[in-house]
Amino acid sequence: MTYCVNLHFDYDPIINKEKILVPPKHHVYMSMLNLFEVVSAKFILDITKTGVTFSNNAELFYTQKDKNGILHRDISLTGPDAVMKDDDYVKINFMLGGQHSLMNWYIPNTDAVAIKSNSYNTGAPAERFSISEVSHVHSATVGYPSLVQVGIPHNITNNLIEDRFVICLVPIFNNKRMTMELALEKLAPFIL
Ligand SMILES: [Fe+2]
């Protein structure tokens, strides 16, 4: 399985960085931004040419440098966020700061019990797992940007070096969230 693949653009797709990179009061935090206030029109146009569109919201995740993220898998299974495959769908992540931090992926053990939860400040749904219920399968440093797998359990280990901000976009094809295989095919022009 592919977990993380870097994408390449010869310009900076992210705009308004100074508004985004403001450390919140909480150690680990998620907020929702408007796509059009986060990425440039050129970036949206370049992606749209491949047939891929985006959900209108962009998420912003913050992890203080000495903290780790929550172990979870993303779930968004209805409406415009329907997925093609329940345990295989991607986001596009732009990591800012968080040098040497890792995104880690896991497979649930057969006895794992997923606990449904919603981010308290955005309502984004997820299923949480305890670390004893999953088996580690891969770790990688997320790029600027990377396609990342979010349909299986994942978390972040930060590094004591710097705070980590990640902007997450949800790519959509035919009104559904994309599998890694489809995203790799459609976004091939941006993969070296
Ligand atoms: Fe996630």
Image: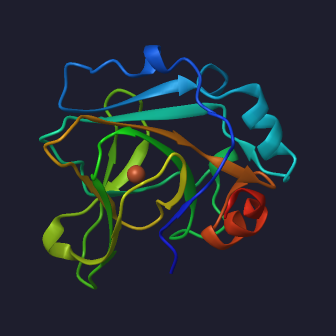
Q: Is residue 192 above or below residue 47?
A: below
Q: Is residue 76 above or below residue 165?
A: below
Instruction: Answer with left or right where residue 67 lies relative to residue 42.
Output: left
- Residue at the limit of the structure toward the top, as seen here: 19
Say how the picture is coloured: rainbow
Q: In which quadrant of the rendered view does residue 88 lie? A: bottom right
Q: Is residue 85 above or below residue 137?
A: above
Q: Nearer the viewer, residue 53 or 100?
A: 100
Instruction: Answer with left or right where residue 188 lies relative to residue 160.
Output: right
Residue at point 32%, 57% (across, down)? 72
Residue 186 x %, y %:
78, 62
Q: Nearer the viewer, residue 77 or 172?
A: 172
Q: Nearer the viewer, residue 42 or 85?
A: 42
Residue 175 x %, y %:
77, 51
Residue at point 61%, 55% (across, down)? 7
- Residue at the limit of the structure toward the bottom, as seen here: 110
Q: Is residue 37 above or below residue 92?
A: above
Q: In which quadrant of the rendered view does residue 22 lie? A: top left
Residue 183 x %, y %:
69, 63
Residue at point 83%, 44% (across, down)? 48
Q: In which quadrant of the rendered view does residue 40 lie? A: top right
* Quadrant placement of the C terminus: bottom right
Residue 10 x %, y %:
69, 42
Instruction: Answer with left or right where residue 151 lies relative to residue 81.
Output: left
Q: Nearer the viewer, residue 75 or 43?
A: 43
Residue at point 26%, 82% (across, down)? 109
Give the tally of numbered discs. 0
